[in-house]
Amino acid sequence: MRTQLKSLFCLIMLTVPFSLTSQQNQTSPVTLVKIGDNLYETRGGSGANGGVFIGDYGVLLIDTKMNQVSVDQVLNEVRKLTDKPVKFMVNTHSDGDHVAGNKFLPESVIIVAHENCRKEFFHPGRNGEASAWNDPSLAKYVPSATFDTKMDLYVDPKKVELLYFGTGHTTGDIAVYFADQKIAFIGDQVFKGRVQLIHSYKGGNSFKHVETLEKMLASIDAEKFYSGHSEALTREDIIAHIKEMKEFQAKVSGLVKKNYSLDKIKNEFNKDQANLVETVYNEITAVR
Ligand SMILES: [Zn+2]
């Protein structure tokens, strides 16, 4: 019995830290999953899901993985499908699990992002630590082509649209839109089945997040939205997410009005919602 308990304890100790950091420790090899015409989702490896589009003139990648092995795996998988050159890497936003692998790309690849995303590369981390991207040797892997509200890229007669709808998860998240296929890659702007992240330390804002998503749905006809950390979402999923966010905000707001302390408000939510509660609380109390 004692041995059984001991082995159960060991199992728990082995399992818990892994599940908490499964994103970082994810070691399954990168695969390209076909999701449309010449369009693939990159799954596995270290870092978030991204995308690959193989056009008539070249290849466009969406988000890098986090290390050399995973970036090489992406490039090798692309090479199995085409000899065309990789022309663009589009970063959907500045989080490390989407951009850390930039530095393992061939220097010939043009890295594109929203102008705020580029600024966030140099933003101090959550705990105030300086960004590793301040190292001058990495300058060539920071986005070198940026835009304000819209940019079209051509690796094919059909354009790929990069669209910015406003602040939300960070200040520089974009949608990479394949209009003819009604498919958009939206990075971490919406998660399904897990609590939404809002990086307030970078300037992200939960109320603007809702407005930004409403603007996105009103602006594009995409039917499938590919997310960095969940299965593809439908328009209905995003509408439901917006509704949930509004209800979440209203609940926090109601408790603030009752003069509940932040800790007391957190007790009214699940533990995994604590960070989002704090973000919303800070946003509400800042404008009071
Ligand atoms: Zn991510």
Image (cartoon, rainbow, N blue to C red):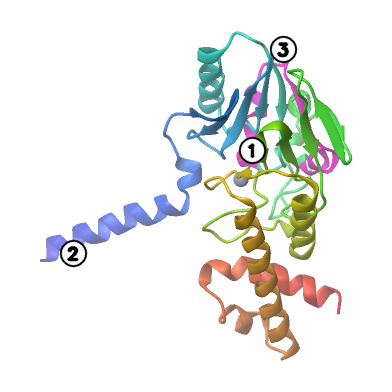
15, 186: nearer the viewer: 186
Q: In which quadrant is the C terminus drawn?
A: bottom right
Residue 189 at what x, y percent from top left? 68, 51
Mark 3 is on which residue type?
Answer: Tyr
Residue 83 at what x, y percent from top left? 60, 8
Query: Marks 2 and 3, Cα distance to the nearest angstrom?
Result: 61 Å
The stretch of residues the image draws in magenta is 96-120
Mark 1 is on which residue type?
Answer: His
Question: Furthest residue to the top?
Answer: 83
Mark 1 or mark 2, which has the lower sequence index? 2
Residue 53 at what x, y percent from top left? 64, 24
Mark 1 or mark 3, which has the lower sequence index? 3
Occupied quadrant, residue 191: bottom right
**The label number, if any, that marks residue 5 in the structure image:** 2
Instruction: Tell whether circle 1 marks a residue whose Cβ is less than 8 angstroms from ligand 1.
Output: yes
Does the stretch in magenta take in 186? no
Q: Residue at x 51, y 22 (%)?
A: 73
66, 81: nearer the viewer: 81
Dot 3 corresponds to which residue?
57
Mark 2 or mark 3, which has the lower sequence index? 2
